[in-house]
Amino acid sequence: MPVVTHRLTFFIALCLGVWAVGFFPYQFSPHHLYIENGAQFSEQQIRIETPGLIHTENAPVWFDEVLSHSLLDLRFDVKINRSQREALTTIVALGRGRWVRNFAIEQDGEGVLLWVRVDNSIKGQPYFVDKIFVKDAWHHLRLLLDADSLRLWVDGKLVINEVLPPLYMSLWSPNHVLSLGSEVDGDRAWLGELRNVSFKSVDKQYSLADMALLRPDPLIVLAGGHASQWRPFSSQFSLDVGMDWLINIAGFVPIGAVLYLLLGNIIKVSAVAALLSFSVEFGQLFLLVRTTQVDDLILNIGGALIGAGLVVLMVRHYRGSVSSP
């Protein structure tokens, strides 16, 4: 019985240690930063070289037509700032912040992340296309939402074509505001340039000049925005990705070794390591300065198996040296 108690105590201490490291620095609520709004705009072009925001005071003038006809046709040219190649930022959104949106188009590293509210989830359904912003050049994006479908073109190529639930726009909030360059609350500030922004309805096409845009000064920025969803396994390798992989593997090697000494079974080690890693990744969904990734879960399990394997090899080597004459 004392052996079981000691093992349980050690296991609890191990879990607490993993959670302490995984959840650091424990930031559950955003810090507010007041900065000079770096957004500059004319009737045709928007340039954001430092965090900035341009938005409508109320629902945009074209939104009633969108809801009545169930048709939204958004077109714009975009050029990203190369410093944000690894960032998750909001280019265009119609909402009240990143937790309450009708739709949003975001830059996720070199990809485009599109959110559309299609059910009772106020955040929306994500659709991701990778390797769009590989080159430092202008790209033309067109988003077409109608009564039962979603289509996104990039430089004339159809990259997303999805069937949506009927009457999904009836769930949209009629009082959401249009924001360009970040969420309307300043979160996920984007850097880059936009031009030829237009919203086309059945009867009319609206440009930036028609939207009564505001530029708040100073801008309240919510520091530490993060992905808030499970990000897919990294398909692009870089030095930063490699270092992240190494840290996630190496961090779970000693954990796997300890778990094997406690449990004595590889399958049990992999199961417990998976639960530990999943608990950390799930908890990070609610932290502002951490990112939840499938990479981490897979690599953590791999690291734990390496640690357990090393213990097995050491035990076999020790037994072989003891039994040999």
Image: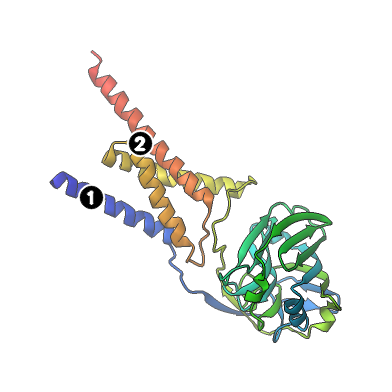
9 or 159, nearer to the observer: 159
Q: Is mark 2 on a helix, strand or loop?
A: helix
For label 2, the crowd category at 10 Å Cα-Cα, with few meaning under 14, some 14 to 19 and many 20 or more, is some
Q: Specify which label sits upstream in the sequence, 1 or 2.
A: 1
Residue at image position (31%, 36%) is 265
Label 2 is placed on what type of residue?
Ile
- Viewed as shown, does residue 183 lie left or right of 153? left
- Disc on res. 266: 2
Direction front: furthest residue:
166
User: In x, y percent, where is residue 148?
Assistant: 71, 65
In the picture as drawn, the residue positioned furthest to the left comes out as 1
Q: Considering depth in this image, is 154 or 238 the residue closer to the camera?
A: 154
Judge by depth and name the residue closer to the eye, 291 or 24.
Answer: 291
Position of residue 215 measured from the top left corner of the image (x, y, whole percent): 72, 83
Which quadrant of the rendered structure holds the C terminus? top left
Q: Where is residue 126 in the image (x, y as percent from the top left)?
A: 62, 61
Q: Can residue 276 be seen in this view?
A: yes
8 or 47: nearer the viewer:
8
- Residue drawn at x 16%, y 44% is 3
The residue that appears at 70% across and 58% down in the rendered structure is 162
The quarter of the displayed image where residue 218 is located = bottom right
Image height check: is 308 above or below 208? above
Counting from the top left corner in percent of width and height, residue 230 is at 54, 57
User: Dot 1: few (<14), some (14–19), or many (≥20) neighbours within 10 Å?
Assistant: few
Question: Which of the 4 quarters of the picture holds residue 282?
Answer: bottom left
Question: What whole-number distance in Å separates the C-alpha atoms at marks 1 and 2?
Answer: 18 Å
Q: Mark 1 points at which residue?
A: 8
Callout 1–callout 2 Cβ contact below 8 Å: no
